[in-house]
Image (cartoon, helix red, strand yellow):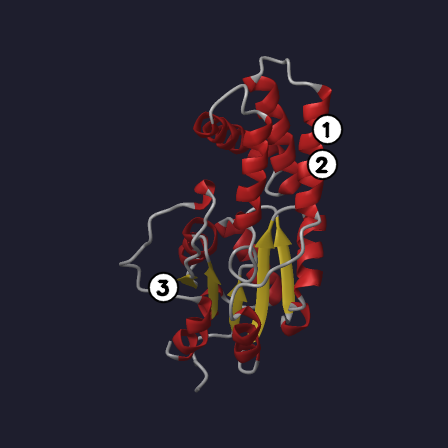
Amino acid sequence: MSKSTALDIVALDADDTLWENEHFFRLTEKDFQSLLADHADPDHLAERLIEIERRNLRLYGFGIKGFTLSMIETAIEITNGEVSGKTIAELVEIGRTLMQHPIHLVAGARETVETLATDYSLMLITKGDLFDQERKIAQSGLADLFDRIEIVGDKTPEAYQRVFETAGVAPDRVLMAGNSVKSDVLPVLDIGGWGVFVPHPLTWAFEHAEEPAQHVRFRRVGALTDLPELVAGL
């Protein structure tokens, strides 16, 4: 496979691109709904939880700690402040369990990263709680395949610009691939880079965005394992 002359760096997202993440959040939400089943139906609980999560993002950022606090806040609101200490303790334990969940790589993740690493400088760019992201990166067994690892609070055009400037690379020489059009594709396209959408069956509602199908630097692959061939063809 020939190397693309259009790129200096291939950057990859982590959660739900290289390893499973949303799946475990969904299971946790089911536990949350079971705990509060006497107070509201599952659909209403899900709606209130996502609303409160969105509201809290600017304060807590992305990650399990903020999610746990949002579950507790939702429980307080749904029960009109009458939620028991026992239930709150159980919600805290649910969050603690989520933070200790072992890493499950997406099918073909290691092989894909190893293939790309033979020809390109690789960068891992993920967002969320620093401690939790560092834990997942270490447990993934993929860290040594990346030349740079960046953990940011949010994936904005400005954040990507800072990351690429620090790496000494122009955005138009970078390709970013991930499962979120909103976080992994659009901000990179905005600053002149390449954005590749790698679909995942489960994507958090906050990350949904319309694919920029007509953008000259946008690409879509069917699976992560298709990425090396796409990159080589640019």
Q: Where is mark 3, residue-wise?
A: 220
- What residue sits 37% from the left and 79% below the top? 233
Task: Report helix, strand or loop for mark 3.
Answer: strand
In the image, what residue occupies the spot 61% across and 24% down? Answer: 73
Q: Could you tell whether 233 is left or right of 36 in the image?
A: left
Is residue 180 left or right of 110 when viewed as pictured? left
CA gap, disc 2 to disc 3?
A: 38 Å
Location of mark 2 (residue): 93
190 is higher (above) or lower (below) than 1: above
Looking at the rendered structure, which numbered label has been put on residue 76?
A: none
Residue closest to the far bottom: 2
* Residue 171 in the image, given as x and y percentages of width and height: 48, 64
State whether residue 129 is above or below residue 113: above
Q: Is residue 70 left or right of residue 172?
A: right
> Mark 3 belongs to which amino acid?
Arg
Residue at the disc numbered 1 = 89
| Quadrant placement of the N terminus | bottom left
Q: Secondary structure at mark 1?
A: helix
Residue at 58 percent of width and 59 percent of height: 125
Is the Cβ of the residue at disc 1 closer than 8 Å to that at disc 2?
A: yes
